[in-house]
Amino acid sequence: MTIKTVLITGATSGIGLSLFNQYVARGDRVIACGRDANKLALLAADAYKTYQFDINNSDEIKQALQDLMQLEPLDIVILNAGDCRYIDNAKQFDGKLFADLIHTNLASLGWLLQYTMPHISKGGQLVFVSSSATILPFPRSEAYGASKAGMDYLANSLRIDLANENIKVTLVHPGFVKTPLTDKNDFNMPFLITSEQAATRIIAGVDKGKAYLHFPKRLTYLLKFLSLLPKPIWQKMITHNNPPQDKV
Ligand SMILES: NC(=O)c1ccc[n+]([C@@H]2O[C@H](COP(=O)([O-])OP(=O)(O)OC[C@H]3O[C@@H](n4cnc5c(N)ncnc54)[C@H](OP(=O)(O)O)[C@@H]3O)[C@@H](O)[C@H]2O)c1
């Protein structure tokens, strides 16, 4: 297989770290991006290059990625860095949490695209790590779900505009994956998979140039089926399983 140049944001933890390890293991040139300098330093020996920046800071992104032009053209860019926090009380809506999450998970993508796009090769591929939370609305997920739904639209729209540029766009909807991000969750996560399993599925789908990936299928097909039912039915099911927030 030809050696590829792969840039991964959020390569220092969870799904991004497993993607990093698996691409490195098969001999690709991997550019690891992260916010935590110490975690990033641990990847330096295996990485083609490391870039440290906070995706919420456009100046840091610009500064860090300015020498991309001196590297091999990017074959695959995986926009994976992200955060998940919940709106614990919808009646006392936390505007700052909402704005922060939209910024981290969605607005930052504009800057990342601006500074990586000129370096993506013809025949290259952009990969967006969204969430199966956009298939059906989950409780307390107003901010996270909205940020990922925005990402879905961005990816699907870009796919149309980049087709003539010969750049593919892959949108990924993972279900629950065991990572530091979900270790904080205090609820049952059905069909939880490991970050290694998630990375294997993403890499296989990206290799095939797929436009859309979702896994594990036993969860995502269930969500897709429920989403086809009349709204009052799934609304009732979800509300039934979601206790009033002042009793949580
Ligand atoms: N885990 C799941 O069940 C699940 C399900 C669906 C979708 N996803 C999505 O998958 C992606 C990866 O999640 P994960 O579960 O692997 O989470 P994770 O283990 O918490 O890793 C998050 C990664 O994003 C980076 N990151 C977060 N905020 C950043 C910021 N402001 N600037 C720069 N880097 C930042 C972190 O960098 P540092 O470590 O350097 O701070 C870390 O590398 C996220 O977009 C998440 O929404 C996860």
Image: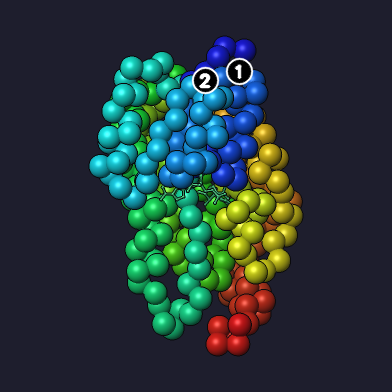
Residue 210 visible somewhere in the drawing: no
Residue 213 screen position, x and y as percent? 59, 40
- Helix, strand, or loop for circle 2? strand
Residue 108 visible somewhere in the drawing: yes
Q: Residue furthest left?
A: 59
- Dot 2 alpha-carbon crowd within 10 angstroms: few under 14, some 14 to 19, many 20 or more: many
Can you say whether 216 is above or below 225 in the image?
above
Q: Residue at x 30, y 41 (%)?
A: 60
Q: Is mark 2 within 8 Å of ligand 1?
A: no
- What is the distance, in whole Å, between disc 2 and disc 1 at their CAs? 7 Å
Q: Residue at x 63, y 73 (%)?
A: 238
Residue 144 screen position, x and y as percent? 47, 60
Tag 1 residue:
27
Tag 2 residue:
29
Q: Quadrant of residue 146?
A: bottom left
Residue 157 screen position, x and y as percent? 38, 41
Q: Residue at x 60, y 18 (%)?
A: 27
Can you say whether 227 is above or below 196 in the image?
below
Figure coloring? rainbow
Where, quadrant-wise, is the N terminus in this rendering?
A: top right
Q: How many marks?
A: 2
Residue 90 screen position, x and y as percent? 46, 79
- Helix, strand, or loop for circle 1? loop
